């Protein structure tokens, strides 16, 4: 996930500086993927915490 976030940040900067609409759209898609990964990690952490309490 970290490498995806780094690449997405780099692409976001490039999209802004180059005014590249297509790249900006790909940044939005990648950002949504990062959000989904973050939610999945959060859910796994909560599951692990619940299992440890039993």
Image: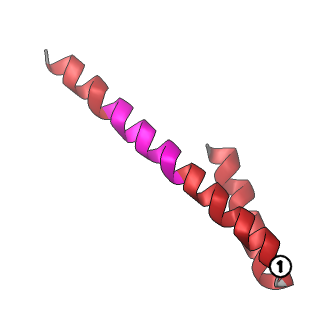
Q: Is residue 44 left or right of residue 35?
A: left
The residue at the far left in this view is 54
Q: Is residue 13 left or right of residue 32?
A: right
Residue behind mark 1: 20
Query: What secondary structure is found at the residue carrying circle 1?
Result: loop
The residue at the far right in this view is 18
Q: Is residue 43 left or right of residue 27?
A: left
- Residue at image coords 56%, 51%: 34
Q: Which residues are magenta?
A: 35-45
The relative height of residue 36 versus residue 12 in the rendered view (above or below) is: above
Rendered image quadrant of residue 11 = bottom right
Quadrant for the N terminus in the image: top right
Q: Position of residue 27 (x, y in %)?
A: 69, 64
- Residue at image coords 83%, 79%: 20
Rendered image quadrant of residue 21 = bottom right
Q: Position of residue 30 (x, y in %)?
A: 66, 56
């Amino acid at each position: 996930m970290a490498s995806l976030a780094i690449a997405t940040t780099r692409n976001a900067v490039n999209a802004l500086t180059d005014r590249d609409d297509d790249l900006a759209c790909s940044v939005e898609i990648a950002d949504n993927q990062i959000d989904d990964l973050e939610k999945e990690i959060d859910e796994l952490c909560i599951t692990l915490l619940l299992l440890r309490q039993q």
